[in-house]
Image: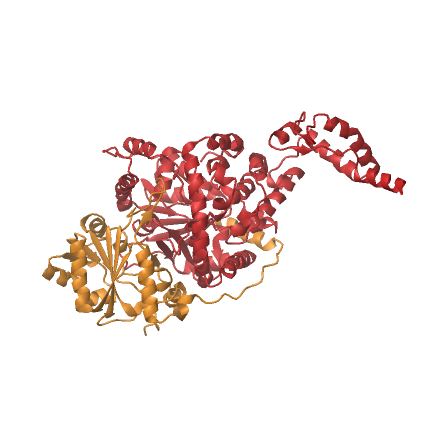
Amino acid sequence: MEDSARQEILDRLRQAPTQAVPERLDLPPLSERSQDREALIETFSRKLAAQTGVCHRVPDTASALEMLARVLEEEGVRQAMAATDEYLASLNLPDWGREHGFDIGTPRDYPDRAAYKTAVFDRVQAGITGADFIVAESGTLALIHDRDQARLISLAPIVHVVLAPVDRVVPAYEDVMESAFGHGRRPSHISLITGPSMTADIQATPFKGMHGPRRLIVILVERGQAVAPAKGGPPQQ
Amino acid sequence: MKIKTDQYAETARRELGNPNSRVFLNLLPAFLSVMRQAAMQSFPDPAAAHAMGGVIRAEALDRLPELLEQFERNATAAGTKVFWAWDGHAANGYILDLALKHGIGYVTKGKSMITEEIGLNDLLEENGIEVWETDLGEFIAQLLGRPPFHIVGPAVNVPVEEIRDLFMDRIGLEKPTTDPVELGLAARNFLRDKFHHMEMGITGVNMAVAETGTIINVENEGNIRFNKSSPRIQVSVMSLEKVVPTMMEAMHLLRLLCRNCTGQELGAYVSLDTGPKNPDEIDGPEELHVIILDNGRTRLYQDPNLREILRCMRCGGCLNVCPIYRRIGGYPYGWAYSGPMGQILNPLLLGLDRTRDLVQSCTLCHACRDACMTGIDHPGLLLYLRSKAAEGDPDLGASPESWPIAWFFKAFAHAAANPVLWRTTVRLVRSLFNRTAREGRVTKAPGPLAAWLESRDFPAMPEKTFHERWADLERKG
């Protein structure tokens, strides 16, 4: 029956009369295309701030961890779940947390999906992730999800902290997609995150933290050590 | 959802007197329209960017069969299960079977107009499967059993006192409050538990990318992301026109969609799925089902005029600028779709007989056409539908006009095409028609003209027609 529906739909579409299509236009490039790195970072943090996101820029890994401690302290976070993407893995956050009084786990600490879900929903107050791209155009973080970038970490906890090397800044969405889907890659899931979870569905009163995080804090690291390229670049041999 | 398109006039009349609706209709659409215009200015060439939306969608429709096959091929290669559904019955049946097979107790849903179109919730609930809408506005509308008031804020008009009572009654709100934020948090806490333990999530689709086999959803709350991250099974339902050729074109439409919908440069969350999760991922769906739904669309596609409405991406821009929507809100449209796009889609999907008032209720001001991000000429389509209704086109579910009206217009057409008959009729009708004229205006008339003159005056017919005056002039030399 399904095949017949498929065939019938396609046949009917093919039999339909054709119609003239309007002519293509030239679109001038987005202004972000002509911005240098500094301007892109400035655009990103300005647009993120417009969505109540906070952007801290720090010179190196040591100061990034200092900033992380401050942010977790300010937000009242004792337990956090961290992703294990290249940059975060290089920071070894679980060990760092133990030294600094934070209980930071990763999805790998849990025997199965159910235990991990209980932790990320109920146990932790913050999710810590990297970002594969930092998109200037709209103040957006692009997360390409895989085994080291679990989906719920940036969604279920009430605070989302992002730690990422500043050289992952790109002008526009197209840069993300070219890289993510280049060379025949097919990432199962991509999230573009622009500010915290929000709604205005009751009496048009806006507030943050409807279902996902109420707070989004980004720490951009100037000279992140051991920076592997984002999940773009040439395919690994 | 119960279809109430035939109660348009009475619902509109009621809504005109509803103070809660008035407050939001006076503010929200105007506010969103201003936001839209401001957001469009962030393009280097806003007019060209706007026009490009129409070009991309028109090209996509032109290549629709080829693009659907390409999408299916690429999605399937990535592990997505693609199901083609001829109608709502087939789509609903597929989802129900899936839920029963996996012993699902409840499903959660992201806001999707398509599942409202096919009445999915009713079927699942009849079969003992709980359904939870998870967009806050949809959640409230669902608990109230009402259709959406606005495409972006489905329950934005509902007073806080009503939501307070509703939440105390239905979701165990303990401390009575009328603070919208507190009420939102109560919904958060209630739905959080659903998100945590869900096994099946259902979403719509904003765009499907043929080139990569990807589906894209846009939202602000994060509920759709939960539906794509927490359960083992994800079902996403798309009407077949949602496909676009390439990821780059999808990105341009994404910019237009968010700007036209809420005046945002981008919704808080955009999520793209290309197949289910990989085996080594700890969250995400193990099964991703995408349902490609026809439900009457291939029929519309046969008519090159009507095909244009399939460009629609449901941004809601046309609602916010429509002088009629801005008076009556979303309820009178009586079904899943409201505003100018609903005035075209509802009749085409339900048939003209059940939706006569929707087709008529337009001032032809063209504000919707100017705002449309995909260049749909709504007023032109409404005129076309009016002509089809007058013809009694059975393909569009229109029965012939009632005989007095049909007879009147036939006689009119005949008289208007015959000079001698026309002049005689004018002479005969003039004195009759002018009998009630006051200061050169006719304000009342008997019979079928009475309703027409309720809100309009007609100029009295002059003493002499142009031809009569011309003849007089010639006589005088």
The image position of residue B438, as x and y in percent, is: 68, 28
Task: Name the residue at the front extreme.
Answer: B476
Vertical placement of A133 versus A17: above or below? below
Residue occupying image coordinates x 28% and y 38%: B179
What is the x, y in percent for residue B88?
A: 47, 42
Please tell me in which quadrant of the rendered image residue B139 appears.
top left
Name the residue nearer the viewer: A231 or B448: B448
Judging by colour alone, the chain drawn in orange in this rendered image is A
Question: Is A70 on the left-hand or right-hand side of B80?
Answer: left
**Residue at (25% x, 71% y) in the render:** A227
Q: Nearer the viewer, residue B14 or B333?
A: B14
Q: Which residue is outermost to the bottom? A: A237
Residue A110 rendering spot, x and y as whole percentages: 19, 55
In this rendering, position of residue B310 left or right of residue B282: right
Quadrant of image for the C terminus of chain B:
top right
Q: Is residue B218 visible?
A: yes
Where does residue A4 sit, x and y in percent of width and height?
Answer: 52, 49
Is B404 drawn above or below residue B261 in the view shown?
above
Residue at point 17% right, 56% down? A72
Q: How is the image coloured?
A: by chain
Colour chain B appears in: red
User: How many numbered discs?
Assistant: 0
In which quadrant of the rendered image does the N terminus of chain B lie? Answer: top left
Viewed as shown, does residue B106 lie left or right of A226? right
Q: Nearer the viewer, residue B179 or A113?
A: B179
Residue A142 visible within the image? no
- Left or right relative to A220: residue B3: right
Residue A206 versus residue B421 in the image, above or below = below
